[in-house]
């Protein structure tokens, strides 16, 4: 049986199978593990760039005054920041660490925007020092803090208020962020958001330019964006009428879905762009609001498909009549998503990608937790120790959530393009694990 065409939209678009051998970006997957070791994360540069271009085209063709800002917590490295810079998209950061990586890659600070529900004073100072574009203020504590820091620098920092519109995006409980009962944002329904607008307009040291919300992730349905736009833009109109607030920037956040498994496709970028822009324009016009600049913040959907994790098979355990376990050399230390979100993945044997599946196995990681599974009930041809498995859609929230659990050195990362593989992060060593342990020195 040839490589299932249903995989085509999960793997990077440069993926090819010839004589059963899987290649990404013109690089043979098994060869990559021979050269760079296993487990290995492979990012397809063409896929990332094409996706950036799709976002820009889809939104700007409908509303030219759109900025695409990538939520870098999905995956960040100097390489990723460089690609984002070259493609003309902005960068959302949620910590001083993310900002430091972006700055070290020469990313323009004015195109970085600082999110988060509890930014530290040091982090905010670093951001202001760097010349960050906007600070997305989450609460009153932060509003005062940003104003004080900016005043001390003799500046007025452009800020955007993060609001919670009270919209349930019907995603995983751990990743819904737009409801009333969330730690994120100033609730509209309690009056907190209105109070924050008044306060921000009055305070020296900040310049209130806009409003933001983010509903959660991943959103396979488009309706929540319209619900949020309705609430947010009605609120903006109310603030305009009552306080003369001028909405110059508006963001409905990110949360666009990625496809992880064959049976659950994600809406295309065009569908999100269509739904969001048409709803945004409709609500602006209904309230006679001058149309602000639109910020759209894809994270997951910009990088998930570009990343493929490669693991090597080791132990096999058969429990008669119950389950067969195939263990690999990675797991929850590099991909915690199955353990915490019940996330689903596909797996393919990279040198026998055309082989008919012959058994159902559960792919387990190597770490000391029963929850350390990668794929429950995967259909695979019979595997043997040494076989390499590719798990697609591993580009988002894998490496950025990776840990050194069990003192696991984190994997190497390569970027592939046109048949060339480039190491962008070397595998961690035991010396790296000890580098911060200063006891006995
Ligand atoms: C995480 C985050 C995003 C991106 O979410 P995705 O689901 O990865 O698209 C966008 N905006 C904000 C404020 C975020 O925190």
Image: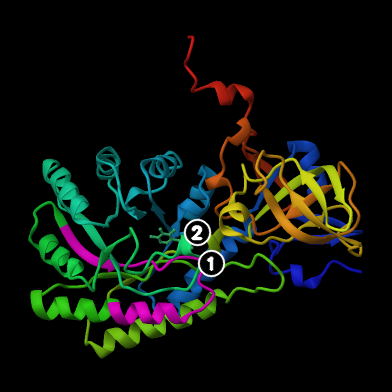
At x 87%, y 52%, the residue is: 351
**Residue 118 has which mark?**
none
Horizontal and vertical percent position of residue 203: 9, 56
How crowded pointer 1 is (Cα within 10 Å; few <14, some 14-19, many 20+) is rated as some
In the image, the segment drawn in magenta is 207-231
The structure residue drawn at horizontal position 67% and vertical position 39%, both measured from the top left corner, is 367
Q: Which mark is residue 87?
A: 2
Tags 2 and 1 in contact by the CB under 8 Å rule? yes
Q: Quadrant of residue 421?
A: top right
Examine the rendered structure and indicate whether residue 350 appears above or below residue 196: above
Q: Position of residue 291 (x, y in %)?
A: 27, 79
Q: Which residue is mark 1?
A: 53
Does 61 appear above or below 397? below
Q: Which quadrant is home to the N terminus?
A: bottom right
Q: Image check: 33 left or right of 291?
A: right
125 relative to 83 in the view: left or right: left
Judge by depth and name the residue closer to the eye, 329 or 96: 329
**Percent position of residue 164, x then y:** 30, 68
Task: Please state which of residues 3 and 118 is positioned toward the viewer in this rendering.
Answer: 118
Give the residue displayed 61% in from the left and 52% down from the top. Answer: 339
Q: In the displayed image of the protein, which residue is found farthest to the front?
A: 321
Residue 10, x across and y down, in percent: 69, 65
Q: Give 21 or 74, whichever is nearer the viewer.
A: 74
């Amino acid at each position: 049986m040839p490589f299932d065409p249903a995989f085509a939209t999960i793997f990077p678009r440069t993926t090819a199978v010839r004589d059963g051998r899987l290649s990404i970006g013109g690089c043979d997957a098994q060869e990559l593990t021979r050269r760079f070791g296993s487990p290995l994360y492979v990012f397809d540069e063409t896929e990332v760039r094409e996706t950036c271009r799709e976002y820009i085209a889809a939104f700007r063709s409908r509303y030219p005054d759109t900025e695409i800002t990538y939520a870098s917590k999905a995956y960040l490295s100097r390489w990723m920041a460089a690609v984002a810079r070259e493609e003309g998209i902005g960068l959302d950061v949620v910590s001083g660490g993310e900002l430091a990586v972006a700055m070290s890659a020469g990313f323009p600070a004015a195109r970085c925007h600082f999110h988060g529900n509890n930014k530290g004073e040091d982090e905010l100072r670093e951001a202001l020092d760097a010349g960050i574009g906007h600070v997305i203020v989450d609460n009153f504590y932060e509003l005062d803090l940003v104003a004080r820091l900016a005043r001390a620098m003799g500046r007025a920092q452009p800020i955007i208020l993060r609001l919670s519109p009270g919209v349930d995006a019907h995603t995983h409980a751990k990743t819904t962020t737009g409801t009333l009962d969330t730690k994120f944002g100033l609730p509209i329904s309690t009056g907190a958001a209105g109070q924050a607008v008044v306060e921000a307009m009055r305070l020296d040291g900040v310049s209130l330019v806009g409003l933001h919300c983010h509903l959660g992730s991943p959103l396979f349905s488009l309706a929540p964006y319209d619900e949020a736009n309705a609430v947010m833009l009605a609120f903006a109109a109310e603030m305009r009428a009552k306080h003369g607030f001028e909405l110059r920037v508006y963001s409905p956040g990110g949360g666009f879905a990625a496809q992880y498994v064959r049976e659950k496709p994600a809406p295309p970028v065009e569908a999100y762009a269509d739904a969001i822009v048409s709803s945004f324009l409709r609500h602006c016009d209904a309230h006679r609001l001058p149309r602000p600049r639109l910020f759209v913040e894809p994270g997951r959907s910009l990088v998930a498909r570009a990343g493929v994790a490669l693991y090597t098979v080791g132990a096999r355990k058969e429990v008669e009549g119950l389950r067969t376990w195939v263990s690999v050399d990675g797991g929850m230390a590099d991909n915690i998503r199955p353990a915490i979100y019940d996330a689903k993945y596909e797996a393919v044997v990279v040198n026998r990608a055309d082989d008919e599946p012959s058994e159902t196995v559960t792919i387990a990681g190597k770490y000391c937790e029963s929850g350390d599974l990668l794929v429950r009930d995967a259909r695979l041809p019979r595997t043997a120790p040494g076989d390499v498995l590719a798990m697609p859609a591993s580009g988002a929230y894998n490496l950025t959530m990776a840990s050194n659990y069990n003192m696991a050195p984190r994997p190497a990362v390569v970027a592939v393009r046109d048949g060339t593989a480039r190491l962008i992060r070397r595998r961690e060593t035991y010396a790296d694990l000890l580098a911060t342990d200063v006891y006995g020195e």
